[in-house]
Image: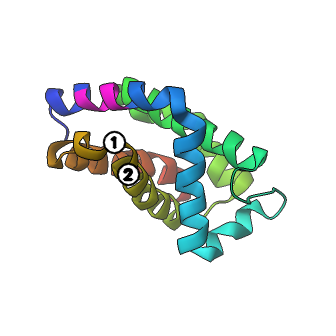
Amino acid sequence: MLSNYEKELLVKIWDKMTPVAEDIGSEALLRMFTTFPKTKTYFAHLDISPRSEHLRSHGKKIVLAIAEGARNINNLATTLAPLSRFHAYQLRIHPTNFKLLNHCMLVTLACHMGDEFCPVAHAAMDKFLSAFSAVLSEKYR
């Protein structure tokens, strides 16, 4: 459960990250593909080499979706319903991959934010990304 302060903090963080969405998203994806190579199987049709247009484009989509979720955190299930259906029924992404990406996103944010990624921000982001992943995984049940 996120406090009102944590919710406000999340919106501020994602508002700061949105202008560099391609960088944040592509770095988190590349980190996931490098650390967990099996996650690449869902992207076999794309060029996922560092700084590729496909990687940057998909990374940006991810960051913008997360930022939108943070802005609508009180209605997260409704906001993410189309993405949840898409990932479950069309893409058939295994839900474990969402958790792996969460971890990589936390590391990426820590690298980019430095001291601003304080323990409170880290904890709030971890809780939020866990909720985000849970909503994306709902259709798998």
Judged left or right of residue 32, residue 111 is left
Determine the image quadrant of residue 39. Answer: bottom right
Q: Residue at x 40, y 60 (%)?
A: 103
Number of numbered discs present?
Answer: 2
Which residue type carries mark 2? Cys
Which residue type carries mark 1? Met
Judged left or right of residue 43, residue 114 is left
Res. 40 visible in picture: yes
| Mark 2 → mark 1, Cα distance in angstroms | 6 Å
Q: Residue at x 35, y 30 (%)?
A: 73
- Verify CB contact (< 8 Å) between mark 2 and mark 1: yes
Residue at disc 2, secondary structure:
helix
Q: Residue at x 16, y 49 (%)?
A: 119
Label ID, residue 111: 2
Residue topped by disc 1: 113
CA neighbours of label 1 inside 10 A, class few (<14), some (14 to 19), many (20+) = some
Residue at disc 1, secondary structure:
helix
Picture coordinates of residue 136 (x, y %)?
Answer: 50, 48
Magenta segment, which residues?
9-13
> For residue 65: magenta?
no
